[in-house]
Every structure is written in structure tokens, then in C-alpha cells.
Image (spheres, rainbow, N blue to C red):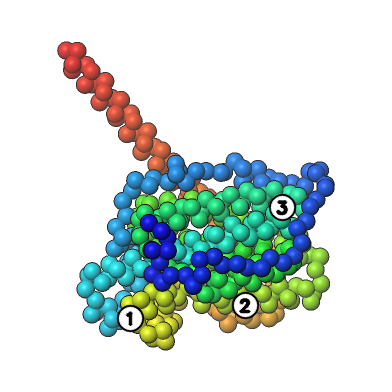
Amino acid sequence: MSTHELYTTPPAEPTWQVPATGAARFSWDYDDGRERLLALYQKGKDKQWDGNKRIDWSLEVDPTDPLGTPDEALTLYGTPHWAKMTEKDRGQLRKHYTSWQFSQFLHGEQGAMVCAARIVESVPDLDAKFYSATQTMDEARHAEIYGRFLHEKIGMLYPVNDNLRGLLGDTLRDSRWDMPYLGMQVLIEGLALAAFGMIRDTTTKPLPKQILAYVMQDEARHVAFGRMALRDYYKQLSDAELREREEFVIEGCYLMRDRLSGVEVLENFGIGKQEAKDLSEHSEYLQLFRKLLFSRIVPCVKDIGLWGPRLQKAYVDMGVLELGDSNLDLLMSQDEEIAEQLDRDRFAAEEEARVAEVAEAIEQGGEAAA
């Protein structure tokens, strides 16, 4: 079945063309680069994996309850609309929300793949080109996995959200080589990590948990890459150049905060746009969700040296300034450990099953001989 047949609303155009700007940069210096970045490149090579093999796609998913998260997380829960819905309607609402969330993850991963490829092209340092080449492969794998989950397990997709599309366009149209880092590695990847993490930690279903945990293990490296490259570069910029980038971050953070309301889902259930916005704005779960979405972005922005008064004021207005003191390294190491623990648990269970199978075969052989 064609993807276009699965969209709740067909995309306005089959292909989105963003005019490329900026120079492609070649480096003729093949000596060793920065030790930290080359170590990250080595880790990027070592940690490559196959989504067809590492993820257990035989696991069943109920499309009417794909994540198993509490209904209290749904915007309509507790409203008159919820009271009027049948259990079938509520199952469809769960399906639509999961489709909407994972569709935005899918579109974001394609954007990350394009941005990583753009970094390979435009960044002047060869060590950064090496690492971003491994990231391009990571993002291709993530898009493949999210696409497969939506096609095979959910059977429904949502078009790219306007605000996500706007930030992707702004990131790709900018001719400065550091902007794909800032827009993708810091803003979009940082926000995606927080969104992935909230679902990973609340879902009771093994397949989405595997997908999110393994994707987050890769993304932890990507954010580390952006931090290293931008921290070094931004030390060299003037105050005026830093302010330009802070303005980009402020606008991008507002776009990302407003993106994750799911108004499109409510509209598909017959609720007008303004009421859908009001319901989303006052949802306690979404208020907490929006704040936690910045748990990866704010400390990263502070770490790379973008922490001027105007940016801090914007974070005060959003209620997230205190997140600047979060331990980003600890969060990233936890992401990696969760994925590795999933592997250990799964392989231990498979080994136990194999041992039991061999023991049973031996016992049956002994009985037959007797």
C-alpha cells in the first residue's frame, strides 16, 4: 500500500523542495583531528546496528492502544467530549495520537538525515565530516524504523506539522555552516530526545519501547557531536554573531513548543481549531510535557555558549530557565544504559529459551531410546 493512502490528510505536495544555499567545503588536511571528535566517530562506527535484526518486529501491537499509556495523557480525557465517546472512539483517538506523534518523529528523522548530509558537505573540518557521515546513516535507519512501525503496526500517518516544517526549512536555507548543527543537533534532536524519553519511560508495550530506546542511544551521540563542534566554534564569534544565533534559538524553541499540541488530531475528531488549541493549552499533561521537552535543549544551549540576557528571558517566559543546570551528560549516559539493558534482558531470555529447547530435545531423545 502506498504511504499516501495512509495519510489522514494527503500532503499538499509529494516532494518538498528546499533551495540549498552555502558552500560545499573540501579539506585537504588529512592529519589527525580533534581527539574527542575522532573518539566519537569511532563510537559511531562501532555502534552501527540493523533495525531489521535488533528490533523484534514479531511483537504484536494493538492499533487501538499502541502504547499502553494512561488515558489521562489524552487531551480530551475528562472533558465532555470524552464522556460522549464510545470505547471504539477512544481506541481510534489513541491510534490517531500515536500516529501523529510517530509521524512527526518520522518526518523529523528524515530532516535530520538531510541536515547531517548537509553538515558533511558544508563543515570545514574533516573530523566533523567523518562523524556526520556516520550520523547520516543513523538517521536513515531511524526513518526506516519509524516508517515501518507506522506502516505495519499502526496503518496511519499524519503529514509533517507546520511548525516542524518551518524550523527544518529555516535550518536548511541558512548558508552558515553551523546552522544545521544548531537547528538540528541542538533544537530538533534535543526536543526529540525528550519526547522519545517520555514515551519510552511510560509505554507498557515492548515494541515501541525497543524502538525508542535504541534510537535514543544513537541520538545521545548526535547531541554530543553538536555540543563539541559548536562549543569550539562559538568561542570565536563576536557578540553580534552570537546574538543572531540566540535569536534563531528563541524562535525555534517557540516553534517547537507550539508544535507539540496535537491540534491536528482533535480536528480529525470534529473539534474546531480554536477549541482544540484551548484544550491543548490547558491540558495538565501537555503543560508538563512541554516543560520536560526542554530538558535536553536548555542545558545544551547554555553549554555551547549561547546564554545572553534575551535568551535567558525567553526561557524565563517559557518557565524552563532552571533546566539550564540539568546534568546533560548524566541524561545521555542513562539513555545509553537503558538500550544496553534491553539488549541484555532480551538476549538472556533468548539464551534461556535455547537452553530449554536443547534440554527438551535431549530428554525426548532419551525417552525414544528407552
**Local SS, label 1:** loop
Give the residue at mark 2: 251
User: Is residue 182 among the parts visible in the rendering?
Assistant: no
- Quarter residue 311 falls in: bottom right
Seen from the viewer's position, the closer of residues 68 and 316 is: 68
Mark positioned earlier in the residue sequence (1 or 2): 2
Give the residue at mark 1: 270
Of circles 1 and 3, which is in front?
Answer: 1
Residue 14, image x and y in percent?
50, 66
Residue 169, image x and y in percent?
61, 70
Quadrant where the C terminus sits is top left
Dot 2: within a 10 Å radius of its alpha carbon, few (fewer than 14), some, or many (20 or more) residues? few
Give the residue at mark 3: 128
Give me the residue at 27% from left, 78% from top: 82
Q: Label 2 near label 3: C-beta < 8 Å?
A: no
Question: What's under tag 2, amino acid-wise?
Answer: Glu
Give me the residue at 68% from left, 81% from top: 310
Mark drawn on residue 354: none
Label 3, label 2: how far apart the Cα atoms are: 26 Å
Label 1, label 3: how far apart the Cα atoms are: 48 Å
Vertical arrangement, residue 31 with respect to residue 204, above or below: above
Question: What's under tag 3, amino acid-wise?
Answer: Ala
Quadrant where the N terminus sits is bottom left
Mark positioned earlier in the residue sequence (3 or 2): 3
Residue 300, image x and y in percent?
63, 64
Give me the residue at 35% from left, 60% from top: 155
Total label count? 3
Question: What's under tag 1, amino acid-wise?
Answer: Gly
Of circles 1 and 2, which is in front?
Answer: 1
Residue 16, image x and y in percent?
56, 67
Q: Is residue 207 left or right of residue 141?
A: left
Mark positioned earlier in the residue sequence (1 or 3): 3
